[in-house]
Amino acid sequence: MKRVLILAVAVTMLFGLTPSAHADGPVTIGVNGGPTWLVKGANMGWIRVSPYWRFINPSPGVFNWTDVDNLLEDVNNYDLKILFILSGAPTWCGSDTNGAKPCNIAAWKTFVDELTKHIAAHPYGHRVGAFEVWNEPDLRDSDTFAVGWDADYTVAPKYVDYVIEASRAIRRNLPGVKVVAGSLSGKRNDLNRLRWTFQDFENTWSYDPDLGTTVNASDYIDAISGHMNGGDDLSSDTAAYLYQYNVLNWLRDYNPRNRYKEQWVTEFGWRSADMGEDAQRRRIKNFLIEMTGGGWGYLSGWNMTHGFIYVCELDLTSRSIYYPSTHYPPHAPKKVVTQYLQTLPFPATQPTGVPVE
């Protein structure tokens, strides 16, 4: 009996937990962007934000920590955690004006190493809870700054190379801080890129000088992330189905090593201008309920742990959950805040077992 128990423990340690061990659970709710006082006012404890690489590291060997320090102090004032996005490459190392073309791997390694060392030494560095590597690398030639991977996806440095080197620096300098990778658009615009992302995670092996051994790329990743910014004609259950179809099933088929890790949806939302505040509230709430395994069950069994609403407050889109400063009254909260998020204790978490509306 003892030998059987020892063998079972060894197998679990080697291959990870079995699917049955990954039960659905509550979902931590965060938001993209600030201001931080509005994030706290909505009872959310996580904010997805960061200064771009281009502004932190404006020239070779030069680092400007002002924006990083201000961010850390700001979130500390409101007791928030940061999902820090690593993106927005500078032109001096070979990127384009849109910041989406990757630089050489040496520049990337130096940037992430210096950044994580600085955060580790900062009195509020503990506010960084996770790093997300890049933003929607399955896209190319986006009109939005720091979105996409504007390079041949099959030529080094590849996205997986960026993930590996970022994770090494994060784990070396900030042990315990999570590495979130994928950041997939959820749009299936380029199926080859989508497949290659997961195949590279699954099949890439690299010698790790810190560990003194060869490591699979998936072992550098704590959580897989993606986005669900579907059209406003989508119901919450249809959005959950499409997220499963456009992201999770590809993970299952091409990267089983990461199948049972935490799944983070780092952008999702609906526009209130097209459907009204109450419909926006219902769809955001119902999507989070879907993430807990409720609703129609499309996301059940996927270990969904974090969901980030897009966005907090932004003049250019009614996806915001607050009205902008130009609105009267300024910064007015929408119903998703007053009739949903503010009813949850801080830090806001969607519990399990709640029926959809």
Image (tube, rainbow, N blue to C red):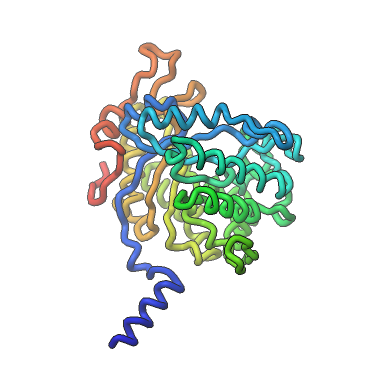
Specify whether residue 319 is in view. no
Task: Compare residues 196 and 157 and report the one nearer the observer.
Answer: 157
Residue 240 coordinates in the image, percent (x, y): 40, 49
Q: Quadrant of the N terminus?
A: bottom left
Specify whether residue 156 is in view. yes
Q: Is residue 4 above or below residue 202?
A: below
Task: Compare residues 132 and 121 and report the one nearer the observer.
Answer: 121
- x 37%, y 50%: residue: 305
- x 53%, y 47%: residue: 183
Asked where in the image residue 44 lies, by quadrant, the reply is: top left
The residue positioned farthest toward the top in the image shown:
328
- x 45%, y 55%: residue: 244
Report the label total: 0
Residue 199 coordinates in the image, percent (x, y): 60, 63
Task: Compare residues 5 and 268 and report the one nearer the observer.
Answer: 5
Residue 195 coordinates in the image, percent (x, y): 60, 59
In this picture, residue 75 sits left or right of residue 61: left
Task: Compare residues 150 and 286 and report the one nearer the observer.
Answer: 150
In this picture, residue 158 sits left or right of residue 39: right
In this picture, residue 42 sits left or right of residue 118: left
Residue 278 coordinates in the image, percent (x, y): 31, 30
Q: Quadrant of the C terminus?
A: top left
Q: Is residue 30 above or below residue 15?
A: above
